[in-house]
Image: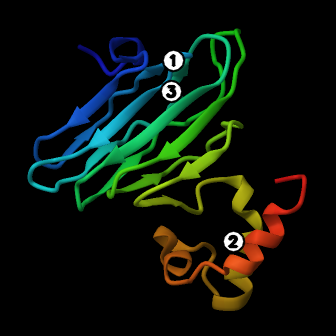
Amino acid sequence: STYAADNLVLDGGTFQDTGPAANTNRLFTVTANGGAMDASSTTNGAVNFTNTSALAITGAGTRTLTLTGTSTGTSTLSPLVGDGTDGNGGTTAVAKTGTCVWALANANTDTGGTTVSDGTLLAFDTGPGNALIDDWMLKKTGEPVDRDGARARSGKVDEAAVARLLGNPYF
């Protein structure tokens, strides 16, 4: 089948990759029942969705796209994750579970929130929202961007600062 989103529909189910490392330009649809992408390669390879077009997000209500798995390779989700795309509205939340690493590689527009309960979720320098980071990088390092999120990955989470920010009603 083609890479079109309607050829792979997550309607509460899970797409599980258990083979060797793989790259695909396939898009997929996430319905109001949500769904999961599971990178659990028996060879610890990553699965990389390379198409940067938007996922199809269908049905009314809130849905959750779960990124999970056990592979030790870093899997990548490049398609744009947004809210409802079929006129029915609804928000999309992203949940990260499982011990693997997933990277979000687009300027996603979903508004349902992001939860990381296990493993690692990478999201870095992926769009115009990072203009402040890019400006800081240029001024402090002479580099125009944080290439591959290298500087971001080298840091440590300041739990006190995060707690203060999360105490603000905006967040």
Query: In this rendering, would 75 be left or right of 32?
Result: left
Q: Residue at x 39, y 32 (%)?
A: 36
For badge 1, the amino acid type reads: Asn
Q: Residue at x 49, y 33 (%)?
A: 65
Query: In this rendering, would 16 be left or right of 68?
Result: left
Query: How much space separates mark 2 and mark 1, taking CA atoms?
Result: 37 Å
Q: Residue at x 32, y 33 (%)?
A: 25
Residue 162's quadrant in the figure? bottom right
Circle nearer the N terminus (1, 3): 1
Location of mark 3 (residue): 55
Query: How much space separates mark 3 and mark 2, taking CA atoms?
Result: 27 Å
Location of mark 1 (residue): 33
Q: Is residue 164 above or below residue 139?
A: above
In front of the other: label 1 or label 3? 1
Residue 101's quadrant in the figure? bottom left
Location of mark 2 (residue): 134
Of helix, strand and loop, which one carries label 3? loop
Query: How much space separates mark 1 and mark 3, taking CA atoms?
Result: 15 Å
Circle nearer the N terminus (2, 1): 1
Q: Is residue 64 above or below residue 32?
A: below
Which is nearer the eye, 43 or 27? 43
